[in-house]
Each structure stands twice: as structure tokens, then as C-alpha cells.
Amino acid sequence: MEARCRVPPRTTSLGPLLRGYRHAAGMTLEELAERAGVSARAIGDMERGRSRGPQARTMEALADALALEGADRAALLVAARAGRRRPKDPAPGLCDLPPDIPDFVGRDKERAWLARAGDSPGGPRVAIVSGGPGLGKSALAVHAAWQVAERYGDGRFFIDLRGLDAEPVAPHQALSRLLKALGIREKEIPADTDERRALYGRLMRDRRVLVVLDNAVGEAQLRPLLPGPGRSTVWVTSRRALTGIEHAARLPLGPLPAAAATSMLGTIISSHSVIINTPHDSIAGGRDDDGAATDDTTDDTAHGTTDDTALREIADRCGHLPLALRIAANRLLSRPSWSPRDLADRLAAEDLRLDRLTAGDLHIQSAFTLSYAQLTPELKLLFRRLALVPGPDFGSALGAVLTGLPEPRTEQLTDELVELGLLVPTTGDRVAFHDLIRLYASKRLHDEESPEDTRAAGTRMNDWLLATARAAGQWFEPDEPHDPTPHGPDAPGASAQHGDGEPSDASSAAATPPTGLHSQQAAREWLEDEGHNWFAAFRAASQEGRHTTVVAVAEAMHWFSDWWIFWGHWPEVFARSHAAAHALGDTRTEAVHLNYLAWSLQVCLGDAAGSEIRALEAERLARQAGDRAQQAWALLYAAHAAAALQRPEDALAYGERAAELFREAGDKEGHPQALLGTAHDLTTLRRPHEALDRLRHVLALVTDPASAPAPHIADYAVANTLRAIGTTHAGLGDWAQAVTAYRQALETGPRVGVPNLRALILHGLARALYQQREYAQARPALAEARDLFHASGNAAKAAEAEAELSDWGPPDRHDG
């Protein structure tokens, strides 16, 4: 007969339990008495609660008469035994909590969260603490459990489920241990796992017990150990997020904040440190266990005072991981002659850091290895290869390039690494390594793959990044491409050698740009998301002397740079592309990229003098090459520099000559920009009405289909020109006309999508509204401008807007 629970009793009390089984069997008192050989009166007393501790022999007879087996039989016998003698405490020595951690530091919010978990009526009774290796999940759970131990008078149990072992603890075994801890004798524990689970659930329902299930491997192991409804609480720790467990409160654990990490180091060191009395000459000239020569100037009381700067550096080099911090503190304590500065310097070397984060049998690498050993070959490959990514984060497309696996498969594998805590999500669908785990991945790559394979993967990644950057940048060219994939003899994908003898970027199929760059917005997002990565690939190409590639990528970035002015790397991009053009011996191309460098020096670094020098040199080279458009661009950048250097007459002269050259060359993009600059110079020279006439002329040029540049550039020019009209009216005190112009500029702004330009327009609008006493509208406009300046990286203008907000006072200052 298959043993299964015949009824689902909702109590562990003997009387209701016995009555429920009798009713389920369809027996009267008299029928049960006759079959069991027990008087009907005795059975009635049990059911009414008058007899709570009948003899074991009587209960065995009743269980036989009711044909109870497995969990049902055990539940009835346990209820009877509980009535005879219910122990005040659970069985001692079984599933006890590990000792508390006396020097536990930090995690105050997390401890408070755990203390509340399972304590709210109707809330989840299961709390899951998840995160990668070394985050101190187990330590947090144990320490928090001791803090709330008094709440759980019926027991505090702990089981290490050994989720990282080759053979984790099976639910069948864990249930046996928990049932024993709850007072069930070995012979009364059901053999069937489902019956053990049912009995466990019944016993936990009416008790207030805290169960800490440490190091769970997955949902299948965990589910049988969750008791269900009742008063008990379960805390779970796992490297996996265990997203399949429903109705659970969740606490994803991350590294400690910097201040808490430094505090943890200081607390451990100060609570265990001793005064060192070793004479200096006993250690002078020796070597420590890292092979480094010891310093005979070490203070005798190396740990008597703490070097806060050194402790912060140690904490940073430990990545703020609690396990690494404890190892570092223990190592420092085990070397009395070391100061915190000594250890900070030893941990500075990235290639030795993991080896040096060792103290006795504590090794930070061991924590990572346990997770790595569980990975499939595909996951191991992806984990190792991602260490080649130079930037702080990445997406699954880059993983596909590095591994050669299909992107959908790489996306699945990336999710699995996140689930295991070996990668952490950042923004959108991008992920990142923890610093120490990145070092571990690099070590695995070095130890498990040949230099040739590693180099090939890195080359494939860089080629793909550069090819995709070019494809993305082309979306911002004046003639927006229908097919943004680069073409031509020097484009990624060409099979021949480039003119400078460098190999093609597309040495593999992986250099093909992604099909996801289907719009200018998608291209912009890719360029910004992968900025650190494609820039590192660009820098590597420059260092390798791949001049044609460097020039081509920088050329593709030229128009996009207006959309991302405050990125911070444009001066280096264009300095490298100018050097590459010079190396190629192409005078015109050198003039082009010298112009780009002049622009970036002025706009990004505020180096007007340096910008003017480069611009005038570019003008000479362009004249030599016979390129009027580049001459005009050079003079335009010289005009901007002269204006910044407070030489408006020179700026106007440069600008008007640039405008004429642009007109002669038929350059629809440069011509309105030059005129726009001269309007600014006229305003500076106190000729505002002439400036307004010129601005209206610019507006007519960029809105007339016959003279307008590409639509996305025309939109930018319209918004910028209307902003300049608003600013000129504001200078004349024509506040109403200024407001009108600024608002017209805002209508065009959304099509442009440049946060800094919108911020400049809003800033002007806010000031004009303030002058018109429209305070209720002025303040929100200024606040939005400040936020957009911050978002675009324009810190100086953000600070300026913030200062004005403070000067304007609270929102209700002007009421009445």
C-alpha cells in the first residue's frame, strides 16, 4: 500500500488530529474502539483533550486500527508523545546555530531587513539573501540570527546545504536532520521524502522556529525544506538568486560601502592588535613571505595607530568584499612588523593581489574557485574571455564576439553568470565584474588558454568594436546612410592590405557590426554604452600603428562628438587621428583631423590658445591641399578661439572669411555655423541689431530646402539659432521676445536629442521668465536645466544653475 497523507490536518494537537483521522476513515467511536481494543471512553477523552498523553502502546493500536502509515502515523504518534512530555527546548546538538561573530562590522541595514523578514503578519515567511562569493552572506545570516534568537523560543536551526560541493546535501537528508532537531526519533522519521516533508510542515505550523538554510544550490534542493504556512521563518543564503522560489522576500547582497569596508578593517585590527616589541635589527634585511625586502624603519607599534589612508587603499583593493577584508586584516595581524601601508603597497600589484589575499587556510581565490568549478565548459569560456573587456561593463554581444557563440546563447550564459553572482547587473542589459572576480577571470584565462587563443580573441573583440563604432558614427554624418556598414578599400571588411600596410580590421566574421544599429538613437546608445570599450580598442589600434583605421574611426566620430561633447576623451581621439594622418603623409586628411583637434581643445578642455594654434596650422595645410571647405572649418575654429580669448574683432574677421569660403565650397553644414558665430561676435562688439539680422538669415538658410543641411543637423542649427536669438533679445532687455525665441527653440530640441543644448535653452528661458516675474515657471525651468547639465557632464554650468537656484530662494519667496 502506498504511504501518503490521507487528510491534511491543520494542527499538531492530539485530539483534533485523532478525530480528523477517525472521520477520514469513516468510523464511529465504537467502531474504532472495537478494532483497536481501546475503550470508546478513552478515545473520547483523547479527542476532547482530557487525555493528552496516552501510552505509546495505545497509540500504536489506534494507528493500526486507522491503517495509518508514513507521515500520518508519525504525526499521530508525535502528538501523543508531545502530550506526555513536551520538551521546553528542541533536541540539543542538532542543527545548532554556529557561534556568533564577535567582531562583525557593518551591514546594519541588511541586519535590520533580516530581522523584519518573516515577522510581519501576512508577509513572506521566507527571506533569500543572494550574491556572489566573498560577500559575507553566511556571516550576515548567522549574526542576524543570534540578534533575534529570543523571538524564536521553539528553536533556531542552521543547516549548511553545501551548495558548492560536488554532492550538495539532498533534501531527504536535510529533512531528517530537521525532524530530529524538532524532537522526532530516528525510527519515527518516514522513509519517503514527501512524507518527511509533510511531517516537517505539520510540526512547524504551530511553532515559532527560525531555520537558516545556508549555501543553497538551487530551487529543487530548497523547496522541500520550506515549511509553508505557519509562524516559523526561513532564511536562505545562496550564490544564486533563486528566482524560481515564489512568495519570498529578497535581499541581493553587494560589496560593503567604502566607509563601512574601511571601518571593518579598522575594527578587526584594533580589536585583535598587539604591541610589537621585536627589535628592528632582528628583521632588518630580511624578506617577507611575498619575497619583498622588509623595511628596518617599521614602527614598533605598527598596529598601535591606524593609517586611515592606507586602510582605505586596502579596502579598495579588496573590492570592499567582507571575506577579502577579513583575510587582509588577519594577514596584517599575523605580520606584526607590517603597517597598513606595507599591506596596501603589497596589494597594489594586480597580478599578485589574489595570491596575497591569503591568511592561513583562508584564500579569496578558493571562494571564487568553488563557483568556477560548477560552471559548464561554455560558461567557463565566457567567464574567462570577458576578462579581456577593457571597460567597466559590457553586453552579451561583446561576449558573443569573444567566444564565437551565437548571441542568443551568450545572453543565456550571461544571465546564468549573473544568477551565480559571478557578474553583477549594471544598467539596462549590461553587466560587470567585481574587481577581484575580474582578476580571477584573468588568472583563469592565463592558466587555461594559450597566448595565441587569448590574443586572437582580443583582436577579434577590438576589430568588432572599431567596425561597430564606425558604423554607429556614420548615422550622424550630414548625409545619413541607409546602410551604415562602412565600405571602401580601408573599411573593415576589405580583404586587401590598407595603404599603410596594416591588416584589415575584418580578419574574422566577428568584425561585422551588429544589426541592432537600425536608427540614430540606437547608434548613439551603443556608442555611449560601449564608450570605454571602443575607445580602448581605438587607443590600442593607435599604439599598434594602424593609422588608416585610426583615421577612419575618428572621422566617423566627428559629427557624433557634437552630441556627446563632455565625454572627456575627444582631445585624445583627435590627437591620435591627427598623428595617424601625419604618418600617412596625407596633407588634406592631416588638416581635417587637426581641425577636429582644434575643436576639441576649445570645447572640451577650454584651451583656446592651443586651439587657435592648431586651427591656423590646419588652415595652412588645407590651403596647401586646395581644400576650401577645410580652410573654412579651420578659420571657424580659430574664430571660436579668438572669441574665447576676448578678441572679438579677430573672431569676426575669421568668421566672415570662413562663411565666405563655406559659401564658395557649397558646404551647407559649415556655412550657417560660421554665420552663427559671427552673430555672437557682433553681439560682443555691441552690435546686437546686426546680430539679430544675421541670426534671422541663418534661420532662413537652415529651414529653406534649397540651402538646408541634413535634417538632423538642420534641427540642431535651428534650435541653436533660436537660442542665440533669445539670448540677443535678453541682452537688449526684450524679455518677452526672448521667452518666445527660447520656447520656439525648445519645440525643436526634442528632435535634436542633445541634453546640453536643451539645458542651455532652458537656462536662458528661466532667466528671461525670472525677469518677467514669472517665478512659478522660471524655477522649474532652471531646475530642469541644472539636471540636464549634470546628465550631459557639464559640471560648470550645472554649478552655475545650482547657484542661481539658491540665489532665487525658496519657491514661495515671491508669493504675494
Image (cartoon, grey):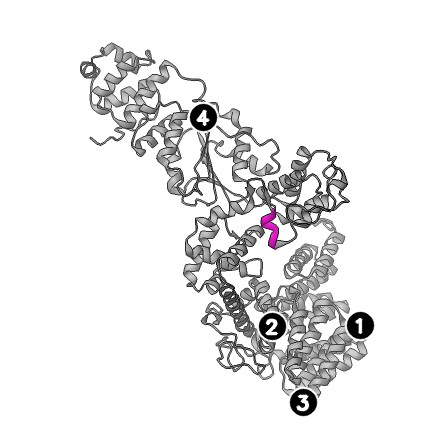
Mark 2 touching mark 4, by CB under 8 A?
Answer: no
Q: Which amino acid does label 2 sit on?
A: Glu
Mark 1 touching mark 4, by CB under 8 A?
Answer: no
- Mark 3 surroundings within 10 Å by alpha-carbon count, few (fewer than 14), some (14 through 19), many (20 or more): few
Q: Earlier in the sequence, mark 2 or mark 4?
A: 4
Q: Which amino acid does label 4 sit on?
A: Arg
Q: Which of marks 4 and 3 is nearer the N terminus?
A: 4
Residue linked to disc 3:
626
Residue 544 circle label: 2
Q: Which of marks 2 and 1 is nearer the N terminus?
A: 2
Residue linked to disc 4:
208
- 14 shown above or below 269: above
Q: Which of marks 1 and 3 is nearer the N terminus?
A: 3
Q: What residue type is labelled 3?
A: Gly
- 406 shown above or below 129: below
Q: Which of marks 2 and 3 is nearer the N terminus?
A: 2
